[in-house]
Image (cartoon, rainbow, N blue to C red):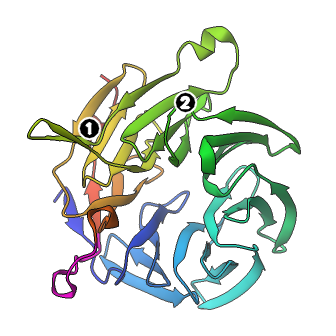
Amino acid sequence: MSEYQLDDTPSDAISSIKFGNKSSQFLLTASWDSSVRLYDIDANRLVSTFFHKQAVLDCCFGDSNKTFSGGLDKNLVMYDHQVQKEIVIGFHQEAIRCVHYCNSKNLIVTGSWDKYIKLWDTRSPSCVGSYEQPDKVYTLDNCDEKLVVGTANRKIRIWNLNNMGISEARESSLKYQTRSIKCFPNKQGFVLSSIEGRVAVEYFDMNPEEQRKKYAFKCHRIKDNDIELVYPVNTISFHNIHNTFATGGADGMVNIWDPFNKKRLCQFHSYPTGITSLCFDSFGTTLAIACSYYYGFGDFEQTQEPKENIYIRRVSELETKPK
């Protein structure tokens, strides 16, 4: 069976799904129903659940059996799933939009609508740095010491985790609001997506020769009677080994792209609702796909309330390897 659905999914929109850094067995989810859930995907079993006071916008695994999560209640929560104990280790002034684990530094990075990112030492645990951003933080990712932050008004900041005193300011090459940023596993650049059905491939090295390689392309668009319907590209996930990446859109489609040969490797079947989050496991053999209703289509009748789904898809080299 190459694809199956998880049981006991959240009762409201799924905002984030994450695999652990070294395991493809356990999947963590954050949801607007205020829950953080841990699944054993091999057994298709919900292992544990705990609740924030309000909607949870992001989550991640730490370096052991601890997870971290944040959302509209502004608190960063560390949860030990073995002993089922939660600790509020800090907070932002506004909602926490991003919770990200920097494996090489053993740090948690949070990004908030209060226009700050904060670094947290997972061992203390405590805040070890707070840095102002140009606007509300919408997305962030890192590769080794490089931390890329996407904010409102299409601003991008590139920070060095070894020296947070300075940052490089860039602007998105896409004309509309940034939705997701992910760094290449080969550490050469990053990919960002927008609400207007486009993806851009960018490079860190500002050498003109390297910068000539950058490009953008249209995706997640549907032609309907000569009218082109354009959907937000909500989520990006990289294949750690091949440096190919998957995108998920509000059109309910998942595509896998080869950024080097500038082509689409494959497109999966249409999913029942929009794709809100994607995550490849570290081995590149499994892709988790979260589907939730896209409210851009308008509200729905209570009787027609769409189910929140998480699909587990075993992917092949044919689907993920550059040709």
Quadrant of the rendering where the N terminus is positioned: bottom left
Residue drawn at point x = 50 percent, y = 34 percent = 174
**Kind of residue sitting beneath label 2:** Ser
The structure residue drawn at horizontal position 28% and vertical position 74%, both measured from the top left corner, is: 299
Q: Which residue is mark 2?
A: 173
Give above or below for 304 relative to 29. Answer: below
Q: Quadrant of residue 111?
A: bottom right
Q: Mark 2: few, some, or many residues within 10 Å (few <14, many ≥20)? A: some
Question: Of the residues shown, which amino acid type is indicated by label 1?
Answer: Glu
Res 274 visible: yes
Q: Is residue 265 left or right of residue 103?
A: left
Q: Which residue is mark 1?
A: 319
- The CA distance from mark 2 to mark 1 is 28 Å
Name the secondary structure under disc 1: helix
Where the C terminus falls, by quadrant? Answer: top left
Closer-to-camera residue (247/25): 247
Residue most extreme to the left: 225
Q: Position of residue 157 (x, y in %)?
A: 72, 41
Q: Is residue 282 left or right of residue 158?
A: left
User: Which of pointers 2 and 1 lies earlier in the amino acid sequence?
Assistant: 2
- Residue 293, given in percent of the width and then of the height, sits at 29, 68
Disc 2 secondary structure class: loop
Question: Is the residue 95 above or below the residue 102 in the image?
Answer: below
Reply above or below: 314 against 214: below
**Along the line of sight, which residue is nearer the eye, 4 or 262?**
262
Q: Quick check: 172 left or right of 201?
A: right
Give yes or no for residue 83 being in the magenta stretch: no
**Is residue 243 visible from the viewing direction of this image?**
no
Q: Residue 116 at x, y = what percent?
A: 76, 60
**Badges 2 and 1: C-beta atoms under 8 Å apart?**
no
Q: Which region shows up in magenta?
A: 299-309
